Amino acid sequence: MTATAEARRIAPQPGPQEAFLATPADIAIMGGAAGGGKTWALLLEPLRHSHNPKFGAVIFRRTSPQITAEGGMWDEAGDLYPDLGAVSRQHPHMFFRFPSGCKIQFAHLQHESDKESWKGAQIPLLCFDQLEDFTEGQFFYLLSRNRSTSGVRPYVRGTCNPDADSWLARFLEWWIDQDTGYPIAERSGVIRWMVRTGDEIVWGDSKEELAERFPDILPKSVTFIPAKLEDNPALEEVDPGYRSNLMALPLVERERLLGGNWKIRPSAGMYFQRGWFDVVEAAPAECQWVRAWDLAASTPKKKKDDPDWTVGLKMGLHPSCQYYIGHIERSRSSPRQVKRAMKAIAEQDGKACRIRIPQDPGQAGKAQVQDLTGYLAGYVVKSKVVTGDKVTRASPVSSQCEAGNVSIVRGPWMEAFLAEVENFPDSAHDDQVDALADAFDEITGGGRAPLAWSPWMDEEGATPPTKKPTRRPNTPALREV
């Protein structure tokens, strides 16, 4: 042990971290919200066996970038494991090796078939960070690799955030109130037993109960330990603004990641509400403007047809950091008519108004962007490949709307807009929501230079540098000895 390790003792914080590291369950899962210190607890778990030369652990994330991202698991492990004499390697595999010979490996299972590469492996400790990201098939296949000749009984540890539609939500339903979606406090850490027969999981309150029913299958003990931000005071001390970041999320994500709600799903009224928009008669003159277009692929051929609309939404940003929806153009027209309308509206908006058009993936999308950009020569035209689901794309502007930071200029188009956004994502059409999301993305940067009044820029127009915390956010309290 190094002098650094002798100078301090790293210990779990009281509460969920201690309970997670103390449970005797074969399978223990911790989490249910963001900021609960679950990843750090997962990294601490294998250290109890670091003196055992035959012991090994594998910590899985779904993709490799999730392991190596700035401040991610690999960086966290690099703050902890070297104090115990561990040496890291990244090629051909990512792992830390301790003086005893014990090895902790980091790996990913991006594709379902990646699980097959672990055939023949013997892994005394299986760890899954963000277990809800993995498939049920990956998890239970890896259980067959959970074997040990190290003298340590094989076991599994995992962390998670709520996902109402994941297999994990069903797996943990006994610990979750199915009416409210929140964990049942008195069941935290309570151990249950399970056997898996084919694709069915059978639960019991005791090992003996299941052993009697399934004498040829060894039951596994399982527990769930919920943790929330308030269970991790070390994080709030190091990064007091983290709670504000979670509070700024849209309602659905805020309920999941701050409240730990396992039942909440996107539904009408959760992302936009009429009362969130302050209706004004005109926008201030100081606004910087963007017009974002969402282009429809077809026109109605019969009266009963209800195809998507072509939408051009104009959004402005005021120096006060208030956003204004200034005008919305909607039409169901031919491509030629749409081009003419875009040109006419660009002339009305003026050359100071940036134009944003979406680019569909593939060569056809690239050709369309080139055609429209050439047709709108003389104007600032920006394009961006459409990625991500509609709810994810709409979430940033939804947060601003809920905070009262988006006003809407009164006009004949206003009612159709409010009706659509209020029913999102269940509305029949979401073209105006897409245009709103793209306009907000463009006006706040969209991965490029933001407009002059971007709230993320200082008075000279430069983006302020990001200050890194003095200690990584999930670090538990360090107790000096």
Image (tube, grey):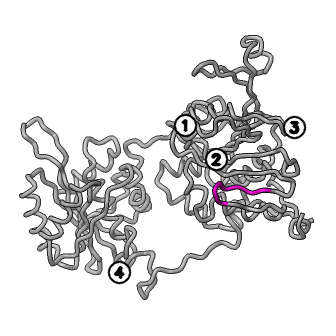
Mark closer to the observer (3, 2): 3
Kindly indicate the quadrant of the structure image that contains residue 120. top right
Q: Position of residue 322 (x, y in %)?
A: 37, 71
Q: Which residue is mark 1?
A: 135
The disc, 4 or 2, on the residue closer to the chain's N-terminal end is: 2
Query: Which mark is drawn over residue 282?
Result: none
Q: Disc 2 marks which amino acid?
A: Phe
Mark closer to the observer (4, 2): 2
Q: Position of residue 231 (x, y in %)?
A: 72, 53
Tell me the magenta residue range: 90-97
Q: Secondary structure at mark 2?
A: strand
Q: CA distance from mark 3 to mark 2?
A: 23 Å
Q: Magenta stretch: residue 394 in it?
A: no
The disc, 1 or 4, on the residue closer to the chain's N-terminal end is: 1
Is label 3 in contact with label 2 (beta carbons under 8 Å)? no
Q: Secondary structure at mark 1?
A: loop
* Rendered position, 172 above or below 132: above
Q: CA distance from mark 1 to mark 4?
A: 44 Å
Residue displayed at 76% across by 36% down = 155
Mark closer to the observer (4, 3): 3
Query: Which mark is drawn over residue 151?
Result: 3
Q: Position of residue 284 (x, y in %)?
A: 27, 76
Q: Secondary structure at mark 3?
A: loop
* Rendered position, 5 above or below 166: below
Q: Which residue is mark 2?
A: 60
The quarter of the image holding the C terminus is bottom right
Q: CA distance from mark 4 to mark 3?
A: 63 Å
The disc, 3 or 2, on the residue closer to the chain's N-terminal end is: 2
Mark closer to the observer (1, 4): 1
Looking at the image, residue 360 sits to the left or right of residue 219; the answer is left
Query: Which mark is drawn over residue 452?
Result: 4
Q: Secondary structure at mark 4?
A: loop
